[in-house]
């Protein structure tokens, strides 16, 4: 039976992550740099999560092994963001974003080759459709300089995020509550980013109330909410399905761009949306499709070989 809770959490994750431009673009317009925005985002998110956990009586205690694992997860999380922003110096942003969103492919390949996850034709087709849809949404069709350095950085961004998704589900923190895991992820990420930003002399203050409002919304909606639902989705439906559902993020970002910032909606964009929705539909239906495929194959074998289905099960 399909896990609807996991699917809904995956869609909420993508929808809220996709709202990042809604809050970051006004901050860019106010002159706040990327490292500072990331510092405020995760430090504020850690505060919100800490208050929530304390108010609901949740435990903060972790052991030494979990402590180290959470620190490692935060480094993977930081790496994904840093590599992507760095790749923008070498590639057009659309190309870089497309390369980063290859992470569902990395997740599927690692799960199949390293963890021996069953290779479902429907999952692979959903990945192909999702990546194609993301490419259509992200690629601006105007070319832009392409460098191997930029491609390598964008791929490293997607690989870091893919490994993070798998690590959550395969490490010693896989049974940790979503709220506790997310809280410590924000704490470590905020501390590491702030230390690096201050040492590089890039840290900036926030001058306007509007800036603080956007930072607070950035910390809550596409950070606290999206990461809690991401962890819940990974635990409920697994790393591969959760990563495929992540392709809904560009759809949300595109919707915000069209409705709020007046960006164009083209036929290519529409086709990308259709492909992504189709990919998500395949994710929902894949258990039933796989069962039907195996049952059909079994019935074909029993019919051809004359084997009674109640005596010899198909494997």
Image (spheres, helix red, strand yellow):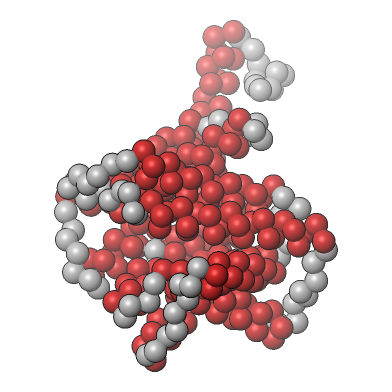
Residue lying furthest right in this view? 63
- The percent position of residue 75, horizontal first and vertical second, equals 60, 57
**In this rendering, would 168 be left or right of 43?**
right
Task: Judge from the rendering whether residue 263 lies leftward or rightward of residue 255; answer left or right.
Answer: left
- Report whether 312 appears left or right of 270: right
Q: Residue at x 38, y 84 (%)?
A: 211
37 up-or-down from 296: above or below:
below
Can you tell which quarter of the image residue 295 is in?
top right
Number of marks in picture: 0
**Residue 45, located in which quarter of the rendered image?**
bottom right
Where does residue 269 sit, x and y in percent of width and height? 23, 52
* Residue 16 position in % (x across, y down): 44, 67
Residue pictured at 75% horizontal, 77% vertical:
58
56 lies left or right of 20: right
- Residue at position x 33%, y 63% from top? 253
Considering only vertical position in the picture, is 260 above or below 172? below
Residue situated in front as seen by the camera: 276 or 179? 179
Compare residues 137 and 8 and report the one nearer the observer: 137
Position above or below: 113 against 224: above
Can the viewer see residue 182 in this picture?
no
């Amino acid at each position: 039976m399909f896990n609807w809770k996991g699917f809904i959490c995956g869609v909420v994750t993508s929808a809220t992550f996709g709202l990042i431009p809604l809050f970051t673009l006004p901050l860019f317009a106010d002159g706040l740099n990327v490292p500072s925005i990331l510092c405020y985002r995760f430090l504020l998110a850690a505060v919100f999560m800490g208050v929530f956990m304390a108010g609901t009586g949740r435990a903060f205690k972790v052991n030494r092994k979990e402590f180290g694992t959470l620190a490692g997860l935060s480094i993977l999380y930081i790496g994904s963001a840093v590599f992507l922003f760095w790749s923008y110096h070498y590639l057009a942003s659309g190309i870089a974003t497309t390369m980063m969103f290859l992470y569902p492919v990395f997740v599927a390949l690692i799960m199949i080759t390293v963890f021996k996850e069953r290779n479902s034709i429907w999952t692979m087709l959903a990945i192909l459709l999702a990546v194609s849809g993301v490419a259509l949404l992200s690629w601006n069709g105007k070319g832009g300089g392409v460098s191997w350095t930029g491609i390598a950085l964008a791929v490293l961004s997607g690989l870091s995020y893919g490994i993070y998704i798998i690590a959550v589900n395969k490490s010693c923190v896989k049974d940790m509550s979503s709220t506790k895991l997310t809280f410590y992820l924000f704490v470590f990420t905020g501390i590491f980013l702030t230390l690096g930003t201050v040492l590089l002399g890039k840290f900036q203050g926030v001058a306007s109330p509007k800036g603080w409002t956007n930072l607070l919304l950035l910390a809550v909606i596409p950070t606290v909410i999206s990461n809690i639902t991401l962890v819940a989705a990974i635990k409920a439906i697994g790393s591969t399905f959760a990563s495929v559902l992540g392709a809904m993020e560009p759809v949300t970002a595109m919707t915000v761009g069209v409705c709020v910032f007046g960006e164009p909606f083209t036929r290519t964009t529409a086709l990308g949306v259709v492909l992504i929705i189709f990919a998500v539909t395949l994710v929902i239906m894949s258990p039933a499709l796989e069962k039907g495929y195996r049952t059909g194959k079994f019935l074909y074998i029993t019919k051809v070989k004359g084997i009674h289905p109640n005596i010899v099960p198909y494997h």
